[in-house]
């Protein structure tokens, strides 16, 4: 993440919290644990990162983290934590990877305490990535993979939650277009990873050709942040 972005997201979570009683946090779909330890530190809580990928968990455990942080293998549809034991569930860029979103929402409802909250950070089909203009097929694939904001909201409201907030948060991806082109070349973006090699190569060439003369402007995208309360 770019400098300041992690702190900015933690600030947005703190802004929307209606309680100071945060003892246990679940970072669902934690990946390499980018948010897990910062969440625990910011809110003085115990944080458990859960992910189905052992490779991701190995990377998460290898990072320095406090004694109140742990990582466990599990899925959104079968979360390895007890009923009504969590105050805050954080889901970052994972909702569109859930095989069964409705079941995942039911599991989230199960593990949350009565006054618990879900903070869901995810790209949606309505928003446009700065990669889209360069890579043939990117936007078409994003439209197939990414949920709409209404779909996310509906899934949680049907699963026993009410929406308490929804905002678009500008997320800076790189300091400039040259840097973004090099980030794209790593192919860590899940949609770039799915593109045919020819489309990916064409996009990288186009980004690198434009980047040196691109205007000095915000290089990023708007990311949806939803807040759901258990009803």
Image: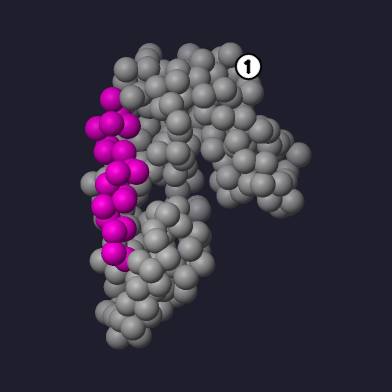
In the depicted view, which residue is nearer to us: 8 or 180? 180
Indicate whether residue 152 is drawn in magenta: yes
Report the residue marked by disc 1: 82
Can residue 42 be seen in the rendering of this structure?
no
Give the quadrant of the C terminus. Answer: top left
Classify mark 1: helix, strand or loop: loop
How many numbered discs, if any? Answer: 1
Residue 103, position in %: x, y?
Answer: 45, 20
Magenta region: 135-154
In the depicted view, which residue is nearer to us: 19 or 98? 98
* Residue located at (45% from left, 31% from top): 99
Indicate whether residue 96 is drawn in magenta: no
Q: Taken as a whole, is the magenta stretch helix, strand or loop?
A: helix
Q: Place residue 106 in its image quadrant.
A: top left
Residue 164, position in %: x, y?
Answer: 32, 28
Residue 180, position in %: x, y?
Answer: 41, 71
The answer to whether residue 146 is left or right of residue 108 is: left
């Amino acid at each position: 993440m770019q400098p300041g972005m992690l702190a900015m997201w933690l600030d947005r979570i703190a802004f929307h919290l209606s309680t100071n009683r945060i003892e246990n946090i679940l970072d669902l779909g934690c990946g390499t644990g980018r948010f897990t330890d910062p969440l625990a530190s910011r809110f003085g809580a115990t944080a458990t990162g859960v992910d189905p990928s052992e490779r991701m968990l190995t990377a998460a455990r290898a990072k320095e983290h406090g004694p109140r942080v742990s990582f466990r293998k599990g899925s959104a549809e079968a979360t390895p934590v007890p009923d009504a034991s969590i105050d805050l569930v954080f889901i970052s860029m994972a909702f569109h990877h859930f095989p069964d979103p409705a079941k995942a929402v039911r599991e989230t409802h199960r593990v949350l305490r009565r006054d618990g909250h879900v903070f869901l950070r995810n790209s949606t089909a309505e928003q446009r990535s700065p990669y889209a203009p360069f890579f043939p097929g990117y936007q078409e694939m994003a439209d197939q993979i990414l949920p709409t904001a209404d779909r996310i909201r509906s899934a949680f409201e049907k699963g026993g939650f009410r929406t308490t907030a929804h905002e678009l948060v500008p997320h800076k991806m790189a300091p400039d277009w040259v840097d973004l082109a090099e980030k794209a070349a790593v192919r860590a973006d899940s949609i770039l990873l799915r593109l045919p090699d020819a489309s990916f190569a064409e996009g990288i060439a186009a980004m690198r050709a434009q980047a040196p003369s691109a205007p000095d402007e915000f290089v990023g995208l708007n990311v949806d942040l939803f807040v759901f309360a258990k009803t």
